[in-house]
Image (cartoon, coloured by chain):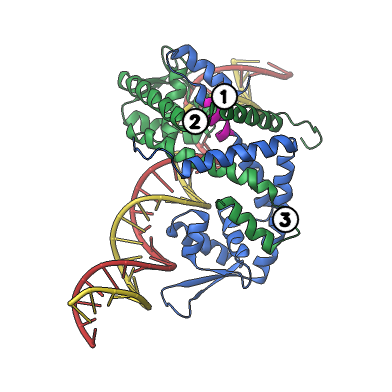
Chain colours: A green, B blue, C red, D yellow
DNA sequence: CTATATTGTCTTCCATGGAAGCTAATGTGC
DNA sequence: GCACATTAGCTTCCATGGAAGACAATATAG
């Protein structure tokens, strides 16, 4: 009996008229996401990076040569506000991992670029990160992992493309 | 092709030697947790509650009559530090949803208790919350939901009770 | 019984991110 | 071409939580 099951049992005692079975899935999904997140952050911290900083370096690295992106693009890719992105870039710039310069065309725009140490760092950190994710995923059998991926994709896509076009 | 698949494709182009299949599961799990969390917070906010405050009220409510718990217990149940719990209780007390008094036995201890409005609020909010979770879960077929729950339990328990006692 | 350790809560300081507004640069309608 | 809207990035202020230590009460060793 895990933590979520204990919570469900308490609710069933206190509010027997309420159906708490959805918690079995949603509660465990959140708990698992938290636990996985903890494990992933261990690797980020090995490189002196927070999760947010790691995400930004990855987004720039994935862009390919010459490893540059606008702050606004980075904000969209990493799903934070532009204000939060400004601060992340500030920290990365202070750490010497990226540089910031004006865009040549549009003078409002900036261009954030990986430095040589920044590129080396994220290349090593990402390889380590993927080994870590592989280790965590290998706690499941390949069959289970594949089934889980399919279920997550199904649920995600049904949330993104609602079949019921009433509320939106 | 979803967001995660796009990210994987970019990594395969940039770092073809790295196996990024684990992201298919772990990335989507985190994204789904975030999306579900957004939906859940919509209900909390209907009652003027943050997620943390909702969690605290639930933990006290689940304790059963007389709906009281020590701050330290609440911190353990909701998985935050006692410092964070102090602040959550401050806010709930200011909102008139809980009261704080000294424990009669151990004078170090405090007892946090639901007020009548606090009890009414969390009882209604929790019922609404469960309807919301049900709505989200019903985006999956019952078979898929059940399969997902099993997979999440399996993975979670393998993380909590590591079969491999060699520590890296 | 007293000195020390432990415990429970709170306080302080810091890190991070969101919301909203600011500024400079660019786009648009007339 | 000029007034106005929009855009990109940044700044300010606030909300939240962690880490570490303060403080008071309790437990424990001798």
The residue at 66%/59% (across/down) is A11
Percent across and percent down for residue A46 are 33, 34
Disc 1 to disc 2, C-alpha distance: 16 Å
Give the extent of the magenta segment. Answer: B23-31
According to the picture, the residue beneath numbered tag 1 turns out to be B4
Mark 1 — on which chain does it sit?
Answer: B
Disc 1 to disc 3, C-alpha distance: 34 Å
Q: Tag 2's secondary structure?
A: helix
Label 3: how many Cα within 10 Å (few below 14, some 14–19, many 20+): some
According to the picture, the residue beneath numbered tag 2 turns out to be A137
Percent across and percent down for residue B78 are 52, 55
Mark 3 — on which chain does it sit?
Answer: B
Left or right of residue D7, residue A161 in this image: right
Depth order, front residue of B158/A156: B158
> Are labels 1 and 2 assigned to the same chain?
no
The residue at 64%/55% (across/down) is A8
> Are labels 2 and 3 assigned to the same chain?
no
In which quadrant is the C terminus of chain A drawn?
top right
Residue B156, relative to residue A44: is it above or below?
below
According to the picture, the residue beneath numbered tag 3 turns out to be B127
Q: Mark 3 or mark 1, which is nearer the start of the sequence?
A: 1
């Amino acid at each position: 009996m895990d933590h979520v099951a204990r919570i469900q049992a308490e609710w069933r005692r206190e509010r027997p008229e309420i159906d708490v079975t959805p918690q079995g899935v949603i509660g465990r999904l959140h708990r698992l996401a938290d636990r996985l997140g903890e494990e992933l952050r261990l690797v980020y911290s090995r490189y002196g990076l927070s999760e947010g900083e790691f995400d930004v370096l990855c987004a720039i690295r994935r862009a390919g040569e010459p490893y540059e992106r606008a702050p606004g693009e980075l904000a969209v890719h990493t799903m934070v506000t532009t204000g939060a992105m400004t601060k992340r870039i500030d920290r990365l710039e202070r750490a010497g991992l990226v540089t910031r310069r004006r865009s040549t065309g549009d003078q409002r725009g900036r261009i954030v670029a990986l430095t040589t140490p920044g590129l080396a760092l994220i290349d090593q950190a990402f390889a380590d990160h993927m080994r870590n994710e592989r280790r965590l995923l290998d706690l499941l059998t390949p069959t289970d992992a594949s089934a889980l991926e399919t279920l997550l994709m199904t649920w995600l896509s049904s949330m993104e493309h609602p079949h019921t076009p009433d509320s939106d």
